[in-house]
Amino acid sequence: MTHLINRDGISVTNNPKAINEELFRGTGSVMGSGASIFIQNESITEKYIIVSKDKNVAGPSEQRFIAGRYQEALKLFLEWLGQKA
């Protein structure tokens, strides 16, 4: 299992519930080995979830999801970490 941290460098439990809590009620960012997921506020009403991976890997290095597509973003984040969703 990959070790995850939040924006402040504090460990985050590696499970979907803990990742959700950290994104929406914590620092808004979770990082692991080679991938990260974070919340970006475009305006007061618009929130996006950004999933990015290390640029040394082939393919797209970032994908943007509206907040309502959280499950898709989480699945991609876990895939890029090398885990099953």
Image (cartoon, rainbow, N blue to C red):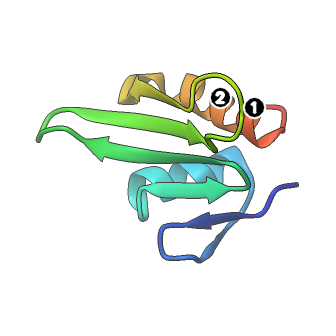
Label of residue 12 in the image: none
Alpha-carbon span between mark 1 and mark 2: 5 Å
Label of residue 76 in the image: 2
Quadrant of the rendered structure where residue 64 is?
top left
Report x, y in % for residue 77.
65, 37
Front residue of 58 and 39: 58
User: What residue do we see at 46% from left, 52% from top?
Assistant: 23
Would you call the spot at circle 2 few (<14 residues within 10 Å), some (14-19), or many (20 or more)? many
Report x, y in % for residue 82.
83, 38
Residue to which mark 1 is pinned: 79
User: What residue do we see at 31% from left, 44% from top?
Assistant: 40
Q: Is residue 52 above or below residue 66?
A: below
User: What residue do we see at 75% from left, 31% from top?
Assistant: 79
- Is 78 placed left or right of 65 in the picture? right
Which quarter of the image is occupied by the C terminus?
A: top right
Q: Is residue 28 above or below residue 51?
A: below
Disc 1 marks which amino acid? Glu
Disc 2 marks which amino acid? Leu
User: What residue do we see at 42% from left, 25% from top?
Assistant: 65
Report the number of discs.
2
Classify mark 2: helix, strand or loop: helix
Report x, y in % for residue 41.
24, 43
